[in-house]
Amino acid sequence: MLTLVRAVIGRDLRLAMRRQADIVSALFFFIIVVSLFPLGIGPEPDLLRKLAPGVLWVAALLATMLSLPRLFADDHRDGTLEQLALAPQPLGLVVLGKVLAHWLVSGLPLALLAPVLGLQFDLDSEALWVLTGALLIGTPALSGIGAIGAALTLGVRGGGVLLSLLVLPLYIPVLIFGAGAVDATVTGMGPQAHLSLLGALALGGLFFAPWATAAALRIALE
Amino acid sequence: MSNRLINWFKYASPQSFYPLAGKLIPWFWALAAVFGIAGLYIGFLVAPIDAQQGEGYRIIFLHVPTSWMSMFIYLVMAFWAGLGLAFNTRLSGMMAQALAPTGALMAFLSLWTGALWGKPMWGTWWVWDARLTSELILLFLYIGFIALQAAIDDPRRADKAGAILALVGVVNIPIIYFSVKWWNTLHQGASVSLTKAPSMAQTMLWGMLLCALACWMYSIAVALMRARSIMLERERHTEWVRALLDPQPAGKE
């Protein structure tokens, strides 16, 4: 079973590496959105420090969502998805592999890039560490929940906008605890509680979301 | 033994449910009117003026029932959705689809009346209170469900996709509610407390319960009416719909 997951991850990563522009454009979207906020709000460091966790997390949410429609669309178009659904292995595991691959090319780079952007918002080093950690823990949940939305909107009219309507309300708990962890560090309360809850969300999301996604994919393939 | 039991599965087919719903709808409308008039009469004329809030509190006779309904309808919708996925019945999907707009309307009314109440009482239209925020998110979930169903042309696929979304939403509602609650207690002091409301006078409670019953009856009636239209639309290729809409097809030859 693990070989299947690993094979799917390897295949998706290879495909992603052949189209690096997609990864880079999502990353630059993240950078640009984050940089727009100081321009809109003003350059006062105190205000920016207060806003930084929320701004970085909302931008991460949007950047993750940007790459979701492509999660299944290409495989659906060339028929690979039908073959995967016909395979003897459970479709849920295939989805898990695709979700993990999506996280590796979208969530992980975001988390690694976030401290640099956090510097622009005058966060101290401890808050930067927590920000990176929270993004590392929280973004797998985003990929997992997003996969459900991507499967439900597969091949549907106006799929991109619809996807954001379906997925963003479900992202709210991740946003609250993710931004809350950084916020709690800045105010000196300690981020442990938030990070634990974020970890629970990520584990729960990675465990349950693939099955819901698999059910949605089977409906889309009917 | 079998003739003592009602065969519930008989009414799982649109053909037999359509006339039944038609017969039930006037009753639910009548009950909605009776309960509504009684509830509003008690609410506006019998219930005393609140000592702290004055006349403005009377909006709770609409606000509380709509809030209850908005939450309850989502559960009912998810129940029908789960039933539809499990038994593959056509009617379940139609019921879920018929309930969604009413649920969204209730959520919207609840937010709107809440804002109207909040302005004189709290001095502001909106606070980021845990309950208000989760009600807003509930409205978003309804909108997402409606949008997904509207975007898929094939009704069978729309039903199933909507069902999965409704079930995912139901699992998420407690998570969202508690996360919003904890977020709220971290960020904002208890400037506004909804929980410490003064205990209600008996007549106020009666008025509210009657209004809640009226909202129930209204929701059932409207959902059944909408389900009937959906049935006709989806089953228009079948014999029984043709016979229903055009009583003498043979005479036109």
Image (cartoon, grey):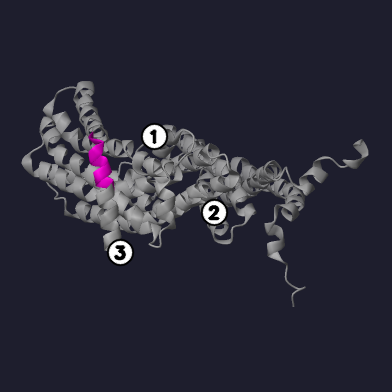
| Residue sitting nearer the eye, A73 or B233 | A73
Numbered mark located on residue A1 in the image: 3
Numbered mark located on residue B126 in the image: 1
The residue positioned 49% from the left and 49% from the top of the image is: A221
Asked if labels 2 and 1 share a chain, the reply is yes
User: Is B214 left, or right, of A90 in this rendering?
Assistant: right
The amino acid type of the residue labelled 2 equals Ala
Q: Mark 3 lies on which chain?
A: A
Q: Do the residues labelled 1 and 3 touch (CB within 8 Å)?
A: no
Neighbours of disc 1 within 10 Å: few (<14), some (14-19), many (20+): some
The residue positioned 54% from the left and 51% from the top of the image is: B77
Neighbours of disc 3 within 10 Å: few (<14), some (14-19), many (20+): few
Q: Where is residue B231 in the image (x, y as percent from the top left)?
A: 69, 46
Nearer to us of marks 3 and 2 is 3
On the question of residue A52 being in view, the answer is yes
For the record, the magenta segment spans A12-20
Neighbours of disc 2 within 10 Å: few (<14), some (14-19), many (20+): many
Sequence order check, earlier mark of 2 and 1 = 2
